[in-house]
Amino acid sequence: MWEQIRDNQVRSAILVTFMGIVLLLVGAVIGYYFLGDPIAGLVIAALVWGVMNLIALFQGDSIILGMSGAHKVGPDDHPRLYNVVEEMKIASGLQKMPDVYIIDDPALNAFSTGRSPDHASVAITSGLLDKLNRDELQGVIGHEIGHVNNRDIRLMMLASILLGSIVILSWYATRIMFFGGMGGRRGGSSGGGAAQLIILVVGLLLLILAPIFAQLIYFAVSRRREYLADASSALYTRYPDGLASALEKLKDNDTKVQTANKATAPMYISNPFYKGGSAGNDLFATHPPLDDRIHILHAMSGASYADYDKSYKEVEKESVIPASALKETAAVGLREATPGAQAGELQDQLDRTRQTSDMLWRMNNYRSLNCSNCGTLLRLPPSYNQPSVRCPHCGFENQL
Amino acid sequence: MIFGIIILAIVVILIFVFIGIYNGLVGARNGVKNAWAQIDVQLKRRHDLIPNLVETVKGYMEHERGTLEAVTSARNLAQSMSNAGPADRAKAEGDLGSALSRLLAVVENYPNLKANENFLALQEELTSTENKISFSRQFYNDIVLKYNNMIQMFPSNVIAGMGGFQPSEFFEVKATEEREAPKVSFSAPPKTGS
């Protein structure tokens, strides 16, 4: 995945530079128009640019988490969530445990942010936390840890903060320009009216274009990495169906995330404003259609990047995984679902007991399946090699 | 003169390639050590949890003395092997896993136990620790595969041979093979679409 990591670094650099150029141009225009000196405008713009980047890099995650209304949780506040994040941290080989946040919101969504894998945070809405069973939660957290490990988080965070501030800045600039332009300067006392008019037009254009450009870059960055994070999640959990079934739950729920805005939307695991696959493929969509993502995950025959790529090709007719990750040819098997896993905190103590013991049976290579006639759970020892098994409850012959 | 420069250039390039590969090998070996340390942390945690578990269930399960003793002795054996190699440890941990699952299979016969607060909290810890063991094992085995490939493939195998790099063992937990009829538990079918 080093191509993806380098790609993210290059894009971060381009983003910062591009924002700088736009900002400097706007500064020069404003400086010329209002202060009579483009240099002064340039200097101010450069200062603003520097401060903005520093803030975006070092305070970006706290700003984003703060805006989302997320609060930090520890191992004792929500053991299950914390444990699942730690499990995914271990599976992905991250060095440092990310901070874990919960957003009190009935909507179903999650995101990750931070400036490096060592300074990362994972946030999930309480609505999603209640709706997912352990396998699904693992899939979602695996996706977020995938963003952390693929270094997507810094680019998304910079884009989010820089985009947000550019939009606000140019909104104010437009205001000042309109009211300033209407008022004081109407007389044309300084002469060279034609030249000034051109600058005014260029300046206006810039002010209008700046947020659009910012938006465009932003859209361009986010779609492919959602697929890559899905692939990472499948690899970490060895169970792509878990994430797929979580995405299905996201699809079926239309609640909007209250605290999401344009600047933070692309960070979420699915679009926080609207869901579903309809018209999702157009140029301005921040997220790939959920239907495609679900379909690809379900069609995977193994858990490796190569398996994801194969499955992706059948839907999109092209490759999505970087070449270096495809070179690792070792087959990666899938694991089985945790039987009887239920959503949210397990209320029924019997279910909890059952889940724990099922998990231990599975650790010992026992296979489990549900009788297709009556649903009774059957456990088969690893040495059992008959082609079918008879359910002792209803007598139905289950094929293996 | 020109010939000499070409020779020198080739030698310099070779030295750089050598340094690059050697450092890559050292990095991979440290990666293996680090991944092994992760497994070690999780196994220690498992060993620390078991006395708690046994202590909690002991009062309820008078008739399962044998099962409890099997868990305790498997745990002590596994703990005593904490400095052994991956293969030996994997065997001891596999035995411990089997003993644990036998214990938890009979828990369903003790309704009072299932209502015990302590036991409920322990179960989340136990589930998560088992998951963490299997994820750290998964990560470790991936890293070992990459490292062993480097040691065996040309040209890094030449440098690995000179530097004395040894291939690492995988950590494969194999359950003790038991000849048993299929285990059946009469649980309700899993609820769907909740």
Image: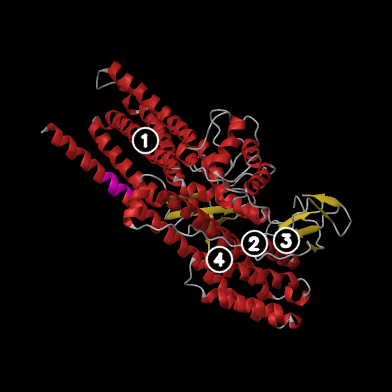
- Of residues A71 and B161, the one drawn nearer to the viewer in this rendering: B161
**Do marks 4 and 3 share a chain?**
no
Image coords of residue A331 (percent x, y): 56, 46
Closer mark to the observer between disc 2 and disc 3: 3
Secondary element at image label 3: loop
Query: Is the magenta region chiefly helix, strand or loop?
Result: helix
Residue B148 appears at what percent x and percent y? 44, 52
Measure the alpha-carbon separation of dots 1 and 2: 48 Å
For the residues labelled 1 and 2, say whether their Cβ atoms are less than 8 Å apart. Answer: no
Dot 4 falls on a residue whose secondary structure is helix
User: In terms of depth relative to the viewer, which is nearer, A383 or A98?
Assistant: A383
Q: Which residue is mark 4?
A: B90
Residue that lies at the very extreme toward the right in this rendered image: A394
Question: Which residue in the structure is indicated by mark 1?
Answer: A14
Query: Which numbered tag is attached to residue A381?
Result: 3
Which residue is found at the position 48% from the left and 52% from the top? Answer: B145
Task: Examine the structure image and report whether residue A221 is included in the region drawn in magenta.
Answer: no
Pointer 2 and pointer 3 on the same chain? yes
Count residues near mark 2 (Cα–Cα under 10 Å), then give few for <14, some for 14-19, many for 20+: many
Chain-order first, disc 2 or disc 3: 2
